[in-house]
Image (cartoon, rainbow, N blue to C red):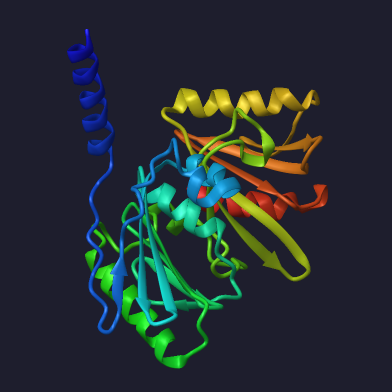
Amino acid sequence: MLKRSLIFLAAGFISVASAAQDFVFPQLNGYKIKSDYPVYLPDNLWDFINGAADNYLANGFVDLHVAEYKKGKTVIKAEVYRHSSNTLAFAIYSSERSPSFRFTNLGAQGYIADGSINFFKGNYYVKIRTYSKSEKVLQAEEALANRIAVLIPGEASMPDMLSLFPSEGKKTNEETFINESVLGHSFLNKAFKTSYQIGNDEFSVFILDAASPEAAKKSAETYIASTGISPVETADSKFMLMDGYNGTVFIAWKDKRIVIISGLAKDQADIADRYISDILK
């Protein structure tokens, strides 16, 4: 019985270990690497980032490797998060990004802000941090970021669907991906979102790709029905809804794709129709 239990425990250990993908951190001249952190998995990520773990888990978190680079009292910490897809790596990266940051050519996209260098590439989100204000340390941190970026597998490119957003009025570096509960609705999931401004008018555009045309139609019709109010058809197969949580919303769908626009007023259907037609053409 004891032997069987030991075999079971060993098998479980192998299974957990195989779920984590090894990552070997590069050397950094003059620094010693401390890499005795555990490999964090979904069941113990809270031990490392506590309350922030929920956002990572909601975006396909797989595993996390951590290392510290030490030189005297100086410390540079590197965190390499692996997610289940490039889209979800972009989702978590973009959720922590601000358009006011200084962007840099790292991976698909990266930024530098207050001693932090964050970027994503392939299925990975990388965060590097130092509290030192020394210019030499900051230069060493950038060198480390570049070395890690080279080691990260995958394409250094943004998700393809971002190219569908019209360029007119689009705010720079405000695109993101919402994996669950778009606009607060549990039946709307997996949407790319970006923000727009035309004159004084600000609004958001969401693009969702369903599994099939039937699934897209069902999601859109569920949304319409949830408002409890008959929609207004603003143009051919384009509708205006009154969402109790989000105010006036415009929606249309074609094949597997749904487009939703929020933030415009009832009398701005022409703007919504123009953007929707551009995306669904």
**Observer-nearest of 70 and 211:** 70
Q: Is residue 196 above or below residue 112?
A: above
x and y, in percent, of residue 91 in the image:
48, 51
Q: Residue at x 25, y 65 (%)?
A: 25
Residue placed furthest toward the top: 1
x and y, in percent, of residue 165 in the image:
51, 57
Residue 280 lies left or right of residue 229; in this view the side is: left
Residue 33 lies left or right of residue 87; in this view the side is: left
Residue placed furthest toward the front: 2
Residue 165 lies left or right of residue 25; in this view the side is: right
Q: Residue at x 81, y 51 (%)?
A: 265
x and y, in percent, of residue 223 in the image:
66, 28
Q: Is residue 3 above or below residue 207?
A: above
Q: Residue at x 26, y 23 (%)?
A: 9
Residue 1 placement: quadrant = top left
x and y, in percent, of residue 197 in the image:
69, 66
**Observer-nearest of 227 and 119:** 119
Q: Is residue 269 above or below residue 18?
A: below
Residue 153 lies left or right of residue 209; in this view the side is: left
